[in-house]
Structure formats: C-alpha cells, structure tokens
Amino acid sequence: MERKRWMVAGWALVFFFMFSPLLLAQEVKFELNKGYGMKEILASYEGKRVAVRLDSGEEVEGIVTTVGDQLVHFSKLSKRDFYDAVVRLDKINAVIFRARSN
C-alpha cells in the first residue's frame, strides 16, 4: 500500500513538471498609445532586452539601459561580448520585443 502511494505521488510530480510551463505561459499585452514615439516605447522597455532595426538595415539587440532625448544606451549586446551601444533615436525604424513566451 505504501509503495502505491509513492508511485501515485511520483506520477503526480511528473505530470506537474511536464505541464506547468503550459499553465504558466503568459502573453504580455502591448498597447500602442497614439502619442507614443520611439523614445516612449523604448523607455517602457528599460531594463529589458529588445532589438532595434536601424535606417542602415542593421539590427542591434541588447538591454535598454537609458533613454535620453536623442540617444538610447544598450548594454549586454547579443553576439558582441563586452560591448555596449549608443544609438540615435531618429535612426531607429523598428523596435522588436518579446511579446509571448511559450
């Protein structure tokens, strides 16, 4: 009887760990305010990882550290260890961010 109880508890744990990511997955809702510009969008993602597409077609991905009036500072750039970047806001065409997790 004791062994059966342990088996049931074990299978319950397996079931929980297999399906808990599906239960915890959330969609982050983004609402675009009509008055928003690049500065406001990037400021709302301060401290989070985003990618930006520049006028030149290049993509810069990193953590938004500081957003100023004309510049944005990205730290911990992807694929570029030990580098940060400062980008002019008027050179950014798109902001790419994570909106869902599996």
Image (spheres, grey):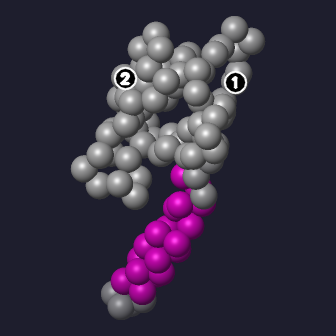
Residue at horizontal 42%, vertical 14%?
A: 68
Does 27 appear above or below 70? below
Residue under label 1, please give it.
31
- Residue 7 appears at what percent x and percent y? 42, 86
- Residue 21 appears at what percent x and percent y? 53, 60
- Residue 92 appears at what percent x and percent y? 59, 30
Specify whether residue 76 is in view.
yes
Which of the 4 quarters of the picture holds residue 28? top right
Residue type marked 2: Thr
Residue under label 2, please give it.
66
- The numbered disc on residue 101 is none
Residue at horizontal 43%, vertical 73%?
A: 13
Write down the region rendered in magenta: 5-26
**Furthest residue toward right:** 34
Does 69 appear above or below 52? above
Residue at horizontal 69%, vertical 8%?
A: 35
Q: How crowded is the residue under tag 2: few (<14 C-alpha within 10 Å), some, or many (20+)?
A: some
Residue 35 on the magenta span: no
Which quarter of the rendered picture does the C terminus lie within? Answer: bottom right
Specify whether residue 46 is in view.
no
Q: Main secondary structure of the magenta part?
A: helix
Answer with mark 2 or mark 1, whichever residue precedes in sequence. 1
